[in-house]
Image: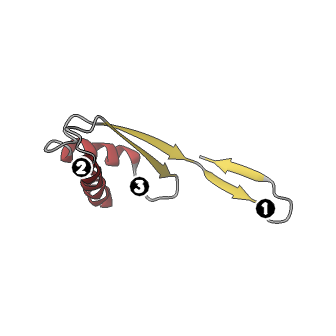
Amino acid sequence: MHEYSIVMALIEQCEALAKQHHAIAVERVNIKVGILSGVEPSLLAQAFNTFKLDGLCAKASLDMHIQPLVLQCNHCHKRTEQM
């Protein structure tokens, strides 16, 4: 499951930014996940809750926004979105 490695990197980035800005905790993490990213949202959320237990993200919530696939015709410029 590559969700674990994604979450580990995400938490490391959040904590590094928090330390850079002298924050004492991270309250919320907002991310966008593309529908074709290959990431399973439920597994990503589970991994986040598992790995956030130590450090500045311990009490953080994860707000995940699933991004649709946007297709646009180069000829007529018609756009469609698919979830």
Compared to 36, does 41 lie above or below? above
The crowd level at tag 3 (other Cα within 10 Å; few <14, some 14-19, many 20+) is some
User: Which tag, 1 or 3, sits closer to the chain's start?
Assistant: 3
> Which corner quadrant holds the N terminus?
bottom left
Distance from the alpha carbon under mark 3 to that under mark 2: 22 Å
SS state under label 3: loop
Q: Amino acid at mark 3?
A: Val
Write down the residue under mark 2. Answer: 15
SS state under label 1: loop
Residue drawn at point x = 75 percent, y = 52 percent:
79
Q: What x and y, as percent, mark residue 37? A: 47, 58
The crowd level at tag 1 (other Cα within 10 Å; few <14, some 14-19, many 20+) is few
User: Which tag, 2 or 1, sits closer to the chain's start?
Assistant: 2
User: Which tag, 3 or 2, sits closer to the chain's start?
Assistant: 2
Residue drawn at point x = 59 percent, y = 48 percent:
68
Viewer-closest of 22 and 13? 22
Compared to 61, does 17 lie above or below? below
Q: Is residue 24 left or right of residue 37?
A: left
Viewer-closest of 41 and 64? 64
SS state under label 2: helix
Viewer-closest of 81 and 16? 16
Q: What x and y, as percent, mark residue 11? A: 26, 51
Write down the residue under mark 3. Answer: 39
In the drawing, what numbered circle is on residue 73?
1
Whether label 2 touches label 1, CB < 8 Å = no
Mark 3 against mark 2, which lies toward the viewer?
2
Residue drawn at point x = 29 percent, y = 34 percent:
27
Q: How is the image coloured?
A: secondary structure
